[in-house]
Image (cartoon, helix red, strand yellow):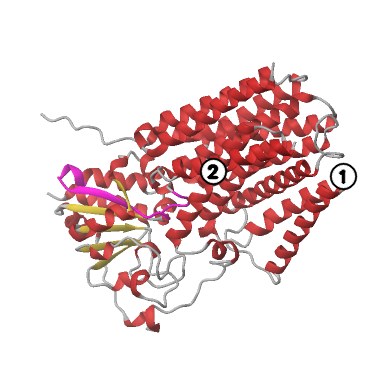
Amino acid sequence: MIAELVGLLVVFVLAMFVGFEVITKVPPTLHTPLMSGSNAISGITIIGALIVAGRGDSRVTSILGLVAVIFAMINVVGGFLVTDRMLEMFKKKPEEKRS
Amino acid sequence: MNPAFIKLFYLLAAVMFIVGLKRLSSPRTARSGNFVGALGMLIAIVATAVFTGILTWQMVIIGLIVGSLIGGVLAKTVKMTAMPEMVALLNGFGGGASALVAAAEFLSPTSEVGIGAPFHINLTVGLSVFVGALTFSGSLVAFLKLREWITGRAVTYPLQKTLNGVLVLATIAVVIGLVLRPEMGWQFAVLAGLSFILGILSVIPIGGADMPVVISLLNSYSGIAAAMTGFVINNEGLVVSGALVGASGIILTKIMCKAMNRSLTNVLFGAFGSTVQQIGPGGGAAAGDKTYREITHEDTAMMMAYSKLVVVAPGYGLAVAQAQHEVRELADLLEKRGVEVKYAIHPVAGRMPGHMNVLLAEANVPYDQLLDMDTINPDFDRTDVVLVIGANDVVNPAARHDTTSPIYGMPILDVDHAQNVIILKRSMRPGFAGIDNELFYEPRTRMLFGDAKDSLKKLVAETKMVE
């Protein structure tokens, strides 16, 4: 069990470095979409929520699981959709027709 | 199915998140990047639903439908000006979900967590609940403050720091207790309650204008919470994705602190903005000694119409006045006359990192005209007119030279290098930091008083008249 935990810790630390590398390249213009988009990614906790909600081992945990699925889904769907709405607006200057 | 096989799907999802974030490095590829990320999430959800052996589908399906509907409606109806509240709210739901998963794991009779579990498992459960519940309540308070359903000001009371310190110590004690004596289940409820209260009390003393930092930080927490939950349920997918978001939030927090010239400790514990500081303009000279000059809309329009380069420096006030569409209309008119128009965006313009860019993009301003502080600053030397709209502290030259000023050292837009500076402002009232702005008394500066939207409409009308 402790080996599993250490393995996860290795993954966690390395992923942090990947995160720093990737995120520092995002220009300030896109910082708001970056926030809402990365927010949606943190909704990955939906995986845990689905497992807990679907296990059906007691009434209490099922209800906790249900609320967790709802919360995580709001985060995922809301996050990705609102990010898309914002990014759709970022347009380059249209090429002017020269006569 | 062999559980090892499912992990390949989570790996695929994690790779897609990284590729998606990478594509955010340019506005050209950003939208497809977001789509790649969403697809990765879909793969992770479907793989979990199909391969992890879900026994009761009722809760799963109800949850998926209800959550998607609420999220979808929120995303489609939210106003672009309300984006900080939206992000705060979504953050809260993410953190809350992570805490709930950890709680369900702890209470579940079939999971390996809880009574009789090895200590390190209960440690991760404790941390997961702590970070998750803190993110949940902290984000909700941030949301309420940004909506102005509760006061946006810093709320302070005596012994505030002492109380928070005691709460932190108590929380640590309960986590230790949970690890050593997991059979005492009540400790779990106490931990959840303490974390929830701590989330509220730690955000309440932070003033409205510091909220961008807090949202960034809570964004980071929601990622860490997801990663912690990954430790609890032994899932690399959660750990990787959570770490990515954690890193992103930390970077944004650092950028915002730097742009405001404040340390993170100062933002979190300084209670900046609880009172308006009564500080005289640099050196203590009374404001009455100085004179400022006003300008008419007509003269401003004339001046801009015959310029080569006009730079717009928008601030929080522009967002409040909802005047971004009028700005664009004015810019279009000027461009038709052959005037070059650029926008100078300070990192803390708007109400969250990058917020001003979104508002201007919504008004159809092309993103290649939106320039960062470092890019635009050298251009001010050849700028004919700068239009400062609703910005104050971010254009105050005192930040460069007046060591007694509270904003000394803060990076600013060098608008005072331009030939003419026009300030659109309601009155001579000082800005958020409560300090006078010496830029207003410079010989090259003219004040154009009035509501920003109103003034811009008049400027548009006047510019049309110029022949």
Residue B211: quarter of image: bottom right
The residue identified by callout 2 is A16
- Viewer-side residue, B292 vs B204: B204
Residue in view at x 58 percent, y 66 percent: B271
Q: Residue furthest right?
A: B183
Please give the name of the residue rendered at 45% of the width and 54% of the height, measured from the top-left corner: B255
Horizontal and vertical percent position of residue B289:
33, 83
- Residue type highlighted by circle 1: Gly
Q: Is residue A54 visible?
A: yes
User: In the structure shown, which secondary structural element does the residue marked by tag 1 occupy?
Assistant: loop
Residue B342 is covered by the magenta coloring = yes
From the viewer's perspective, is residue B337 above or below residue B386? above
Image: magenta residue range: B334-353
Extreme residue in the front direction? A3
Give the image location of residue B137, x and y in percent. 68, 49
Tell me the residue that label 1 is attached to.
B185
**Residue B412 pos. (x, y %):** 35, 62
Please check the rendered image and state whether residue A99 is part of the magenta-colored stretch, yes or no: no
**On the picture, is B45 further left or further right than B294?**
right
The N terminus of chain A lies in quadrant = top right
What count of labels does the image hold? 2
Say which mark, if any, is on residue B171: none
Chain bearing tag 2 is A
Q: Residues within 10 Å of mark 2 (few under 14, many from 20)?
A: many
Residue B90 seen in the current view = no
Judging depth in this view, the residue of B274 and A10 nearest the camera is A10
Q: Residues within 10 Å of mark 1 (few under 14, many from 20)?
A: some
Q: What's the distance in space between the residues labelled 1 and 2, CA to CA? A: 33 Å
1 or 2: mark nearer the eye: 2
